[in-house]
């Protein structure tokens, strides 16, 4: 892999870039695709981050996935041996298939698509979160060919999303924890920092990992365990509210444009959103990852 291109440097792309920079052989070049305006006129915080990338020997490639036709993306992708996409749903409907199509047409040797999430194969088509079907389209494209090797990295939910107020599972200000679909339902979570570290380990692993789904996890936790954890670290009792699947589906019918409700329904159904730690890459390789308790103590309790 003498040349690696990472698409995007956001919440996930940045830790993947820094981990790759630390892990790569000296003969391997590392480049990140960024919007032209991000390179030429970055906002204050981003400018410092780009300087950090430069210091790590990371090059910049200007390009815009949203506005570029596939033919232009093919030309951008051709020089690279491995492409890792860190551009998620925010890049717009159709972007995942667009990126994958361009990668295949460019003849890139190896591809890690943006699938850093749940097990879309198990969830299947027609789920409440309609965006997931496009990720299954990407899997179909990859499995239908043998010219480009691929690795799909299933990470579960970002750990921080469990505590996102808009998502509604943990409401610290109100002292409420909500069980999506039941208290025994489980969810797998991994921090972006650990995803970055594990992605670097996976792409440089020997023997080479190819054409398979690899699972990671910081922790797999039930909503009941989560409620107990919140009580333990805050020292306060929490109110437990169970959000049943059918009631959540009914609310989605009333407001089909509620994107977060679509996610809640998928997680409440409990299918394809968790896996045992024993089957994860990090557990099998004895690589330490951050659990929910550690993340809460560092990112929430420390700042209270």
Image (spheres, rainbow, N blue to C red):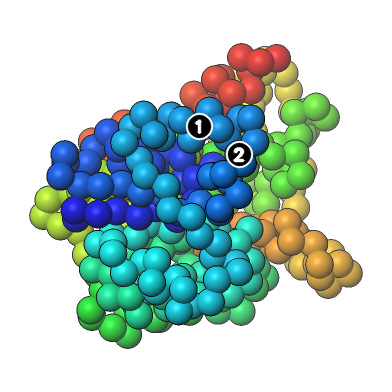
Residue shown at 75% from the left, 53% from the top: 243
Is 260 rendered above or below residue 109? above
Is 261 rendered above or below residue 178? below
Closer to us: 215 or 3: 3
Closer to us: 16 or 170: 16
Which residue ends up furthest to the left in the rendered image?
Answer: 207
Q: Position of residue 15 (x, y in %)?
A: 43, 38
- Asked whether the viewer can see residue 232, the reply is no
Question: Split into 4 quadrants, where in the image is the C terminus?
Answer: top right
Residue shown at 48% from the left, 55% from the top: 62
Residue shown at 60% from the left, 61% from the top: 91
Q: Position of residue 248 (x, y in %)?
A: 77, 62
Write down the residue under mark 2: 42
The crowding category of the residue bearing disc 1, from other C-alpha atoms within 10 Å (few below 14, some 14 to 19, many at least 20), is some
Element on which disc 2 rests? loop
First of labels 2, 1 by sequence position: 2
Corner quadrant of residue 44: top right
Q: Position of residue 184 (x, y in %)?
A: 57, 48
Q: Is residue 196 left or right of residue 169?
A: left
Element on which disc 1 rests? helix
Closer to us: 125 or 277: 125
Which residue ends up furthest to the right in the rendered image?
Answer: 254
Q: Are marks 2 and 1 in contact (CB under 8 Å)?
A: yes
Total marks in image? 2
Write down the residue under mark 1: 49
Q: Is residue 41 left or right of residue 55?
A: right
Distance between mark 2 and mark 1 Cα atoms? 10 Å
Is 218 rendered above or below residue 293? below
Question: Split into 4 quadrants, where in the image is the N terminus?
Answer: bottom left
């Amino acid at each position: 892999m003498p040349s690696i291109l990472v698409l995007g440097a956001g919440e996930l792309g940045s830790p993947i870039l820094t981990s790759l920079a630390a892990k790569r052989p000296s003969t391997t070049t590392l480049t990140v695709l960024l919007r032209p305006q991000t390179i030429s006129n970055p906002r204050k915080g981003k400018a410092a981050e780009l300087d950090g990338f430069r210091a790590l020997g990371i090059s910049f490639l200007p390009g815009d996935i949203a506005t570029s036709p596939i033919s232009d993306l093919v030309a951008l992708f051709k020089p690279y041996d491995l492409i890792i996409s860190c551009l998620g749903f925010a890049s717009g409907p159709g972007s995942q298939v667009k990126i994958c199509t361009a990668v295949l047409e460019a003849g890139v040797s190896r591809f890690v698509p943006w699938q850093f999430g749940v097990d879309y194969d198990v969830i299947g088509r027609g789920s409440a979160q309609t965006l997931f079907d496009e990720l299954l389209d990407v899997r179909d494209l990859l499995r239908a060919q043998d010219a480009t090797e691929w690795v799909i990295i299933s990470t579960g939910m970002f750990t921080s999303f469990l505590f996102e107020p808009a998502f509604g599972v943990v409401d610290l200000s109100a002292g409420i924890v909500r069980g999506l679909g039941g208290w025994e339902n489980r969810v797998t979570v991994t921090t972006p920092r650990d995803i970055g570290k594990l992605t670097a380990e996976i792409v440089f692993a020997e023997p080479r990992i190819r054409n398979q789904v690899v699972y990671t996890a910081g922790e797999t936790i039930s909503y009941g365990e989560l409620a107990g954890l919140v009580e333990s670290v805050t020292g306060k009792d929490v109110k437990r509210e169970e959000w049943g699947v059918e009631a959540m589906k009914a609310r989605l019918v009333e407001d089909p444009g509620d994107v977060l409700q679509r996610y809640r329904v998928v997680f409440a159904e409990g299918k394809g959103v968790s896996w045992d730690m024993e089957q994860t890459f990090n557990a099998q390789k004895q690589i330490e990852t951050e659990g929910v308790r550690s993340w809460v103590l560092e990112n929430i309790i420390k700042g209270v």
